[in-house]
Amino acid sequence: MVRVLFVASESAPFIKSGGLGEVIYSLSKEIKKIDIDAGVILPKYSEIPFNFQKEMKKLYAFNVNVGWRNQYCGIEYLELDGVPFYFVDNEYYFKRCGMYGHYDEAERFAFFCRAVIESLEYIDFLPDIIHCHDWQTGMVAPMLRIDYPKYNSIKTIYTIHNLYYQGVFPKEILEDLLGLDESTFNISGLEFYGGVNFMKGGLNYSDIITTVSRNYSEEIKTPLYGERLDDILRSKSNILFGIENGIDYSIHNPSTDPYIYQKYDVNTIDLKVKNKLALQKELGLTVDSNIPMIGMVTRLVKQKGIDILLSRLEKIIKKDLQIVILGTGDKHYEDMLYEMKAQYPEKVSVNIMFADRLAHKIYAASDIFLMPSLFEPCGLGQMIASKYGAIPIVRETGGLKDTVIPYNEYTKEGTGFSFKNYNPGELNNTIDYAIKFYNDKEVWRRIMQNAMNLDNSWKKSSGKYKELYLKVMEEK
């Protein structure tokens, strides 16, 4: 049996900031069902809930060199859903408020990358493959190849969840933090416009590269989406694969969801409206089952299309509809949304927070779910919304294009609505087009059924990962 160690900076249910955390937890669980022995290693953040921390077993303690520094490293262990989770403990680096955004991010994750490799000598999980995720783990593959010849038989896979965030730092960290001597090491595999790029290290030193949708794997090979790494990605085309993320139906399922007001499924769609009426009442909106509700659960940043939404929001709100937004992000977007809420309190609900329970309620209550992203590597929101019968409106980019089938009024096929160009006018027109069908209850029911019957589970995606694992092992 192939043994795979997932290396990531976050994982549900311990701690997550977004889709990455959900993916690590769900994929590691699912991959074990198809005869892949999976484990996960994470930083032990102080914000991991106490109920998990008290269950962790302390396994080993040793020192890790971070450049000239010699730092303590503890390894703790907890098994969940049959998956072994290992936690890298160092209070100096990880006992902080928030996972990301600290002044010494390069040092924190340089330590984490080296600690992962050093831990292989101690934990009872020597992998055949180390599967790294996003920039925080980008230095695992270079360090493994350069400094640890005894592990040369271990293959590495590197997954890009979002190319925009690369981990770029001053060149001085090569020796100071990474312990790589420029006089004896060719730095071109890490160098990036005068600095050092963690993600570039992962791309150049890994045996296989994946990203989280087929369409995004093609987009990032172009200058428009390649974030100045498109030349490398084009050169790696033969080892670059796009595999869509899935969603965990044990968590995101309206027939079993404990957070929503009224459970329902594709055969009891008429019950869904009870969720809308209850959420309208809870949020102080006009209580009316006939008013279409548009939901958004998102980060309030430009990537998510907030700017083109705001440029047309007042015009959109003047239609006969309601909009409910949940998320946090850039302050100027938050302030503009609050202003709109103040003007239209019975039509607009703005909730600047991270609240998982409310997110579930929004999916269940919404008639339409909006994702007008500038770019979107995969996106989970549109897949979750589909399961809840909240019909997605998306821009045709990345995984949104792969997972939402535009409704065709002639063939009656399709699971949502889409627009091509990053343009507020196209967004507005697409909302109008969707509402036209919303007002035809028979047609809208058919679209809801199409969306709810989609299979976006991890079963398909995990099978594709297994194929890659077997492929890279054959190349040993």
Image (cartoon, rainbow, N blue to C red):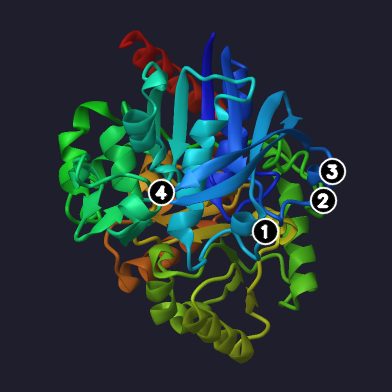
Mark 3 in CB contact with mark 2 (< 8 angstroms): yes
- Horizontal side of 332 relative to 249 (left or right) equals left
As drawn, the label of residue 95 is 1
For label 4, the residue is 135
Of the residues under marks 3 and 4, which one precedes in the sequence?
3
Residue 449 visible in the current orientation: no
Q: CA distance from mark 4 to mark 1?
A: 21 Å
- Horizontal side of 253 relative to 456 (left or right) equals right
The quarter holding residue 138 reads top left
Q: CA distance from mark 4 to mark 2?
A: 28 Å
**Circle 4 — which element?**
helix
Q: CA distance from mark 3 to mark 4?
A: 29 Å
Of the residues under marks 1 and 3, which one precedes in the sequence?
3
Q: Nearer the viewer, mark 4 or mark 1?
A: 1
Q: Nearer the viewer, mark 2 or mark 1?
A: 1
Q: CA distance from mark 2 to mark 1?
A: 13 Å
Query: How many C-alpha atoms fall within 10 Å of the one at disc 4: few (<14), some, or many (≥20)?
Result: many
The residue at the point 40 percent across, 37 percent down is 159
**Circle 1 — which element?**
loop
- Horizontal side of 253 relative to 133 (left or right) equals right
Query: How many C-alpha atoms fall within 10 Å of the one at disc 2: few (<14), some, or many (≥20)?
Result: few
For label 3, the residue is 54
The quarter holding residue 403 reads top left
Q: Amino acid at mark 1?
A: Lys
Where is residue 209 shown, x and y percent of the image? Answer: 33, 33
As drawn, the label of residue 50 is 2
Of the residues under marks 2 and 1, which one precedes in the sequence?
2
